[in-house]
């Protein structure tokens, strides 16, 4: 297109009307009336994908040849120059299919250039209205929105998943033109069928702060990739969905095929310690423990494998198991219950099932279907090994925690509350565990870097080894931080995943937790959420003083 525009200055020297012969003064033309592709907007109506009018230049070889073919005169030379072709190349393309009735000569030509070509009034040379997709926000949400091909059909992301809704039906007009190329008569007309617009649940502001924090973290940690998902807990709406590497859909030159992937929905990993709140909920539900129970967390051996924690803790409360991320603690809980009970909890909260967003390329993750479970399998299942999840599924699980046990369907389009969900765990029980999760960001917890000043957050970090191509674990890691805020009345669930950090640190508490803090802090402030870190009516709630967290009386 740029090459065609570059010819404008030269073409302005030639006046098409001077090149038109008397026998071409009047003609019938069929003009296609384009139906622009539907606009995609964010939840506030900000445009994320729009269509701008352009034209295609096409030829009818049979008509051209019947009128004497491509001539070596000024008008044909002017057309060839406008299309940045030699006259011989233009003639060769037309003559290659002498009986043909349609070949493209150029696509996505500017309206000004198309008008100039039309005034040449060459036999068998026609224009077709079409559109070119433009993405005003550039790389923002690019991996989610995707892009179209030159024919305006969605081939990636939202553009592909909602292609039918975004595509209208073109119309047509049979017109008569005068010697100047002006339409002097509409003979017949079929109106186009307009496309539908699509309003996403995404908030461009929140998407931008999510992407900025994620991109910087992946680059700083020299990681392979990253993903982050933010969910509006009361409605199940996706407010931001970020993936890195990303790309600019307006200029994809130089982008790799892998850059187009939406890693938040396609990439699967073992979730590590982020599942531990679900283990404690299940143990409480089964009556195996009480909220004030103390668990033996000495290291122990199972099937020849040593189960131990990063630190040495002889015994821990349930809160302590979450705060210290104790593998031994959740292993004991898992071994004390039927494995199917834990499997049922995982599934009811959203693991192993599609989210129903309808996005192309979404993975369902994997829950194992074993006939026999060894004690080691049951233990490691409780700290996030033996199952595969996507970042989106993990965010869905934490949105269910934030709603105190109500599982709501997710939506990538804007919805009006209330959104009815299904209760999958007793409210009081989930609320109890969510309160325990607040300890993770307190001094002594594994997620202190996830803390957000002036707000209470319920969070869990995690780190999982990656599986190599041969199915064996390798010395590569995935760092997670997942949580909800404000903890007193959760509105947002956020998950941050950093894949294979290689700048020294690799634990979730060191790598992904600071990203969680930055994104969640920006979101809470942009949404004008009242700080809940300093309640005046309870001695049992957390109190924030500056950047430090304390429990009164402790």
Image (cartoon, rainbow, N blue to C red):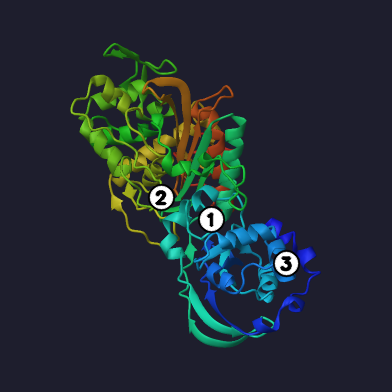
Mark 1 or 3, nearer chain start: 3
Q: Given this view, does label 1 or label 3 mark the residue nearer the observer?
A: 3
- Would you call the spot at circle 2 few (<14 residues within 10 Å), some (14-19), or many (20 or more)? some
Rendered-image quadrant of the N terminus: bottom right
Which residue corresponds to mark 3?
78
Say whether residue 241 is left or right of residue 22. left
Which residue corresponds to mark 2?
360
Say whether residue 460 is left or right of residue 404. right
Q: Which residue shows up at 61% across the image and 74% down it?
A: 123
**Farthest-out residue, right:** 13
Classify mark 3: helix, strand or loop: helix
- Asked whether the viewer can see residue 544, the reply is no
The reply to whether the C-beta atoms of the residues labelled 3 and 2 are less than 8 Å apart is no
Q: Position of residue 322 (x, y in %)?
A: 40, 29
Label 1 – label 3 distance at C-alpha: 48 Å
**Farthest-out residue, top:** 304
Q: Given this view, does label 3 or label 2 mark the residue nearer the observer?
A: 3
Q: Which residue shows up at 74% across the image and 69% down it?
A: 74
Q: Nearer the viewer, residue 349 or 198?
A: 198
Q: Position of residue 23 (x, y in %)?
A: 66, 83
Q: Nearer the viewer, residue 108 or 70?
A: 70
Image quadrant of residue 295?
top left
């Amino acid at each position: 297109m740029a090459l065609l525009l570059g010819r404008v200055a030269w073409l302005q020297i030639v006046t098409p009307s001077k090149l038109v012969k008397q026998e071409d003064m009047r003609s019938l033309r069929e003009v296609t009336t384009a139906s622009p592709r539907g606009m995609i907007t964010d939840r506030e109506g900000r445009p994320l994908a729009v269509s701008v009018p352009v034209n295609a230049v096409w030829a009818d070889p049979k008509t051209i040849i019947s009128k004497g073919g491509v001539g070596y005169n000024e008008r044909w030379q002017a057309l060839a120059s406008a299309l940045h072709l030699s006259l011989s190349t233009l003639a060769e393309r037309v003559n290659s299919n002498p009986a043909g009735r349609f070949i493209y000569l150029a696509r996505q030509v500017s309206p000004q250039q198309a008008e100039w070509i039309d005034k040449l009034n060459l036999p068998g040379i026609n224009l077709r209205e079409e559109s070119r997709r433009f993405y005003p926000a550039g790389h923002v949400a690019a991996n989610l929105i995707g892009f179209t091909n030159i024919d305006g059909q969605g081939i990636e992301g939202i553009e592909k998943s909602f292609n039918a809704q975004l595509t209208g039906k073109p119309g047509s007009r049979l017109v008569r033109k005068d010697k100047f190329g002006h339409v002097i008569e509409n003979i017949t007309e079929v109106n186009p069928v307009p496309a539908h617009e699509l309003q996403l649940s995404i908030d461009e502001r929140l998407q931008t702060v999510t992407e900025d924090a994620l991109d910087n973290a992946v680059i700083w940690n020299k990681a392979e990739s990253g993903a982050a998902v933010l969910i509006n807990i009361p409605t199940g709406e996706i407010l931001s969905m970020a993936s890195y590497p990303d790309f600019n859909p307006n200029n994809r030159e130089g982008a790799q095929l892998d850059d187009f992937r939406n890693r938040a929905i396609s990439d699967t990993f073992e979730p590590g310690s982020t599942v531990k709140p679900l283990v404690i909920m299940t143990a409480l539900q089964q009556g195996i423990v009480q909220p004030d129970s103390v668990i033996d967390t000495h290291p122990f051996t199972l099937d020849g494998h040593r189960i131990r924690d990063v630190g040495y803790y002889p015994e821990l409360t349930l809160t302590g198991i979450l705060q210290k991320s104790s593998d031994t603690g959740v292993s004991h809980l898992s071994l004390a219950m039927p494995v199917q009970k834990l499997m049922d909890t995982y599934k009811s909260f959203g693991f192993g099932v599609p989210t129903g967003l309808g996005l192309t390329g979404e993975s369902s993750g994997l829950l194992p279907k074993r006939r026999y479970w060894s004690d080691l399998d049951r233990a490691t299942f409780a700290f996030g090994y033996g199952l595969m999840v996507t970042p989106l599924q993990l965010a869905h699980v934490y949105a269910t925690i934030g709603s105190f046990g109500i599982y709501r369907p997710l939506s990538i389009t804007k919805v009006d509350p209330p959104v009815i969900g299904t209760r999958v765990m007793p409210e009081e029980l989930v609320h109890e565990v969510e309160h325990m999760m607040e300890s993770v960001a307190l001094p002594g917890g594994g997620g202190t870097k996830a803390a957000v000043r002036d707000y209470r957050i319920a969070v869990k970090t995690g780190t999982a080894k990656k599986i190599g191509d041969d199915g064996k674990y390798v010395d590569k890691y995935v760092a997670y931080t997942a949580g909800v805020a404000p903890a007193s009345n959760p509105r947002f669930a956020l998950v941050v995943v950093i894949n294979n950090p290689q700048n020294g640190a690799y634990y979730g508490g060191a790598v992904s937790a600071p990203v969680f803090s930055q994104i969640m802090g920006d979101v809470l402030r942009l949404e004008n959420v009242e700080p809940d870190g300093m309640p005046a009516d309870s001695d049992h709630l957390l109190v924030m003083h500056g950047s430090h967290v304390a429990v009164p009386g402790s």
